[in-house]
Amino acid sequence: MAKQLGRALLVKIGDGASPEVFSNLCGLNSKAMTINNTSIDVTTPDCSTPGGALWTETLNGLKNVSITGDGFFEDSTSETRMNTVAMAADNSCNFTVTVPAFGTYAGAFRIASLEFGGETEGGVTYSLSLESTGAVTFTAA
């Protein structure tokens, strides 16, 4: 697979309509997605040789996907939607993350944090942190 441009990694927010339309959060300059897998330790000593080597045994635990990003605020429709969801009692909605030439992850995410900032000699910035609220699907490109 050829190398891809980081700016082609897209985070999109759903509009909540049916059918749902997704809009790119264009102001994000830095984006990251992490797939987390936990394990449950079920290690027990071997009854026939309790003093022998003890190997870790695990079961599948929890799965979770988190997304972070930061960039410049553009006052776009998608950023207005992001703020509306963040301020709502139910602060989750559907998002997609497209990894160029690889595929798209899609699911419901809770806006864990939304931060705005700015310097006197710079533009308004924002940082976003999302956590999955259920199963996330992957569709290969």
Image: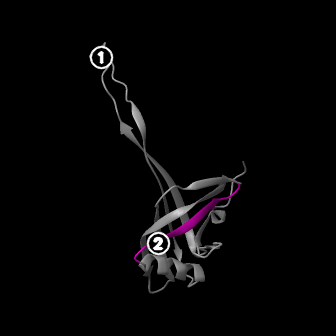
Pointer 1 residue: 47
State which quarter of the image contains the C terminus.
Answer: bottom right
Q: Nearer the viewer, residue 90 or 73?
A: 90
Q: Amino acid at mark 2?
A: Ser
Question: Residue 3: percent from the left, percent from the top?
Answer: 69, 53
- Label count reads 2
Question: Residue 108: percent from the left, percent from the top?
Answer: 52, 64
Residue pictured at 67% horizontal, 61% vertical: 5
Residue pictured at 72% horizontal, 48% vertical: 1
Question: Residue 123: percent from the left, percent from the top?
Answer: 51, 83
User: What's the magenta region?
Assistant: 89-101
Secondary structure mostly taken by the magenta-highlighted segment of the chain: strand
Q: Farthest top residue?
A: 48
Picture quadrant of residue 51: top left
Q: Nearer the viewer, residue 15 or 104?
A: 15
Picture quadrant of residue 76: bottom right
Residue pictured at 57% horizontal, 82% vertical: 74
Q: Is residue 83 magenta?
A: no
Contact (Cβ within 8 Å) of mark 2 with mark 1: no
For residue 73, which numbered disc appears in the image? none
Q: Amino acid at mark 1?
A: Cys
43 with respect to 82 (left or right): left
Q: Is residue 92 magenta?
A: yes
Pointer 2 residue: 127
